[in-house]
Amino acid sequence: MLPAKKTTRRVKRATRRRFAILAVLIALAVVATRYETTSPLRSVVVTDVEALARVIRSEIGGGTRERRLHVAWATRNLAREKDKSIVAMACSPCGRQGRGRPVSTRQPARDDDRRLARLVLSSPGFLDPTGGATHFINPRLQDQLAENGRVRGYRGQTYRRVRRRWQQSYNWDPYYRLGPTLEFWGPRRERTGVWDPADLPWLP
């Protein structure tokens, strides 16, 4: 039988080890939580509401409600066209727009983004204000990115070049513009003549 003093010392050492392990686990949990919050590229998204909310925040940010609504609907339409969930299409994992991710989900969503995403996803299709648009582009920003070439994949990709590729290679048509910086496209429609940006309808 061990002396009482040795037994007490062993108990104390075992207790200290347990507390040390617990402290390490807590510290790791805190670091993981902070990393998840501040690193949107590593965020895990499991619902279409959250994924669409991130698209809204990343693609249109603090734009008008009308613009945010149209971007959300176009994204919903694109996911349906691809027969994918929005999570699978744009948030597996979340990140910048690029190969395999047609829209950006880089920025964390806010509550107003989630409310709008929830509204769009729960609405019947006949309420779609885009008329079936599946893509959008900012012509001015596209030209700026093409000129400065700082973002990978954008050097030389002017709006005019993108527009020609979308029409000729992908068989998409421009549908309308919301102001000079947001243009919506979708599957080709029956039409006559050739579209010119100046001919696009501008929504009030």
Image: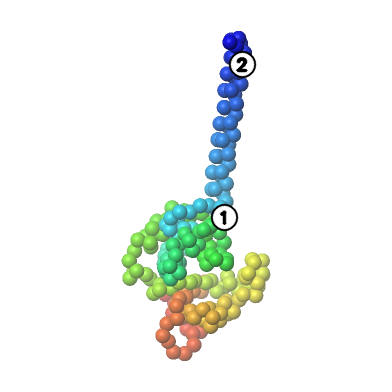
Which kind of residue does numbered mark 1 sit on? Leu
Q: Quadrant of residue 201?
A: bottom left
For the C terminus, give its image quadrant: bottom left
Q: How crowded is mark 2: few (under 14 residues within 10 Å), some or many (20 or more)?
A: few
Q: Quadrant of residue 11?
A: top right
- The three-letter amino acid code for the residue at tag 2 is Arg
Query: In the rendered image of this protein, does residue 192 appear above or below residue 14?
Result: below
- Looking at the rendered image, the disc whose residue lies closer to the viewer, 2 or 1, is 2
The residue indicated by pointer 2 is 9
Residue 197 seen from this side? no
Which residue is drawn at the image coordinates 37% and 70% (left, top)?
A: 128
Location of residue 126 with respect to 92 vertically, above or below: below
Which of the two residues, 154 or 42, is positioned nearer the viewer here?
42
The answer to which of marks 2 and 1 sits earlier in the sequence is: 2
Tag 1: Cα neighbours inside 10 Å, few (<14), some, or many (≥20)?
A: some
Residue under the image location 49 percent in, 85 percent down: 195
Which residue is the site of mark 1? 41
Where is residue 188 shown, x and y percent of the image? 45, 81
- CA gap, disc 2 and disc 1: 48 Å
Q: How far from the left and from the top, in percent, is residue 147?
A: 65, 73
